Image (tube, rainbow, N blue to C red):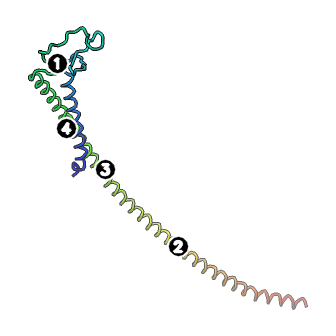
Amino acid sequence: MPLLEFLPTLIGVLASAGSLILAQIGARITRRGPKKGTPFFTDAQGRVRPINSRKGGAADSTEEKPSTTSRPANHLPLEERIKILSENLQESRSLMDEISIELTAQAAKIAEARAEAEHHKSLAAAHEEAAEAMDKLVETTVRRVQGEITERQELASRLNAKRNRWQQWLFFLAGLLASIPLGLLVNFVYDLIK
């Protein structure tokens, strides 16, 4: 399935590589002058002529013009053209092999990157699940602790209310009990003074 996704790209790369190979083959065939590796130019009649390397320009005009009976330089013998074509085809095969190896390596890298991305996605999903579980755990713990704190505060407020009531009753009883002897004492002192 992953290879099918990259098939248009692969076809495009192969097509461009093929066109480059054919362009090189054509350029090499046309570049071949009368002697292998000789610099050349094409004259007005379309004949390939060697460039005079001493002057850096075209061949001297004093050079002999080829006779009409001899073959033009761009028409090499059939055996030599077949040999040139064979060399170019061998080079194109080696280039195609190199391109194939490179494409295979790139496809392997893409597959590896895709597998790594899937692994990271699964890790992210696992971390997300763990994070959600931690959030739920923290949330339930916070709710439980808040509930316990609220219960303790309510219990403490109830105990404080009971203590306050007892304290108020104690003060009332103490005041009542203290007022009777004080009232008797005040009446006794008042009778004495009178």
Q: Which residue is mark 4?
A: 100
Local crowd size for mark 3, using a 10 Å CA cut-off: few (<14), some (14–19), many (≥20): few
Which quadrant does the C terminus fall into?
bottom right
Single out the residue that lies furthest toward the left.
Answer: 79
In which quadrant of the rendered view does residue 170 lie? bottom right
Closer to the camera, 150 or 34? 34
Q: Which three-letter amino acid code belongs to the residue tagged 1?
A: Ala
Q: Disc 3 or 2, which lies upstream in sequence? A: 3
Mark drawn on residue 117: 3
Q: Nearer the viewer, mark 4 or mark 3?
A: 4
Q: Amino acid at mark 3?
A: Ala
**Residue at image location 24% in from the left, 38% down from the top:** 16
Element type where label 4 sits in the image: helix
Marks 3 and 1, the one that precedes in the sequence: 1
Q: Residues within 10 Å of mark 4 (few under 14, many from 20)?
A: some
Quarter-of-image position of residue 156: bottom right
Q: Residue furthest top?
A: 62
